[in-house]
Image (cartoon, helix red, strand yellow):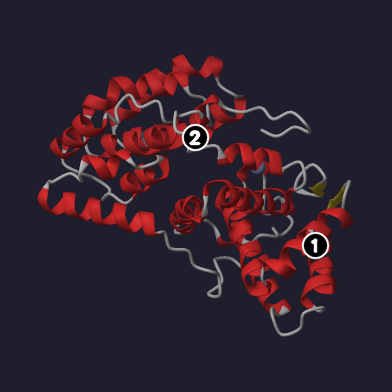
Amino acid sequence: MENPRLTFATPTVIVGDKSLVSLVAHELAHSWSGNLVTFATDKDAWLNEGTTTYVQSRITEALYGRDMADMEEVIDRDELEQEYKTLRPELQRLSLKPGTLADPDDQSSATVYTKGAWFLEFLEKRFGRDVFDPWLKGYFDHFAFQSITTAQFRDYLKTTLIDKHPNVVTMQEVDQWLYEPGIPGNAPQVESAKFATVNAARIAWQGSGQLPAKAVTDAWTTQEWVHFLETMPATLKPEQLAQLDAAYHFTGTANGEIAMRWYPLAERSGYTAAREEMGKFLEKVGRRKLILPIYKALVATPDGLAFAEQVFAKARPGMHPITAGSVQAILDAAKAQATPAAAAP
Ligand SMILES: [Zn+2]
């Protein structure tokens, strides 16, 4: 969480290989996008988070190279694609219509963070950094210490960038990004060479049971492990999970980005050997993004739901109220579905 001149950082970003430090870049970038130029209403949240995520990616690229920035973009965009399969179209607009949100916490992170950053990358790619970078600096200067709406952003973009460099981007294209659901067909695509290696390793393992060479996986960062797990089928055989666990010790990992993908896979696949450590993780970690996917996987079975309720009862007193509310909602929805008759008044 960014505060002007004082970032509060979750310890879950410290995983031993500096692979999650882009969150630090993100919070620091908020000094400009968010704290210097601020969104005026909760319908314009992308102005804070999308811009910040874009700047974060540029910092990651400058510090760790394009490979790392590409991997992070692929992970974010895969997540968006997944979320957009079921997300209400009105929540896929960068600029929300009045009345869309009953609660500001109901925003789609995929839209606000990922689509917002993607839009700016679209502009950057079209205009080139020579033009776009000074423009972005000018934007921060122009609106410094103000709260602005998407409409103000759009007007400024039109007069200072679009109109000044004719035939590069049309306002129609801009408006599609701002006011339409989904991702426009002209969005720049990103491919990660490093993930191609991960895909090949995963496919080979699925076919033959042969794990990749240790020399290969020893060089993998969190991002590669995340992609390795995320691109697995929805369920595996418990013995396949046991094999992965013996080689990579996913169960009990201190890395929340891996845990939030491994435990749901284990739960869906009936690999109960992971339960005990999963419970410890859920008791210890309070970061919403890391624990909600695990609770969602748990509540899919009556046995998992009972386990989730037990763990939540212990974890709740230490939780942030927004997180506790989100977990409670997942449990309530699962219980209502399990006993539809009992839920009726
Ligand atoms: Zn942020």
Residue extending furthest toward the bottom: 167
| Residue 96 % position (x, y) | 69, 58
Q: Which quadrant of the figure has residue 7?
A: top right
Q: In which quarter of the image is ligand 1?
A: top right
Alpha carbon separation for disc pair 2 and 1: 35 Å
Looking at the picture, tell me which residue is in the foreground, 199 or 97. Answer: 199
Can residue 103 be seen in this snapshot? no
Q: Which of marks 2 and 1 is in front?
A: 2
Q: Residue shown at 64%/57% (left/top)?
A: 116
Q: Do the residues labelled 2 and 1 touch (CB within 8 Å)?
A: no
Q: Mark 1 points at which residue?
A: 153
Q: Name the residue under label 2.
A: 18
46 horizontally vs 217: left or right: right
Residue 269 in the image: above or below residue 86: above
Q: Residue at x 71, y 50 (%)?
A: 45
- Give percent across and percent down for residue 344: 45, 36
* Circle 1 Cα neighbour tier, 10 Å, few/some/many (<14 / 14–19 / ≥20): some
Q: In this view, does 198 lie to the left or right of 7?
A: left
Precedes in sequence: disc 2 or disc 1: 2
**Quarter of the figure with the N terminus:** top right
Residue 118 figure quarter: bottom right
Q: Does the residue labelled 2 lie within 8 Å of ligand 1?
A: no
User: What is the three-letter code of the residue carrying label 2?
Assistant: Lys
Mark 2 residue element = loop
Percent position of residue 285, x then y: 48, 23
Q: Quadrant of residue 95?
A: bottom right
Q: In this view, does 138 lie to the left or right of 276?
A: right
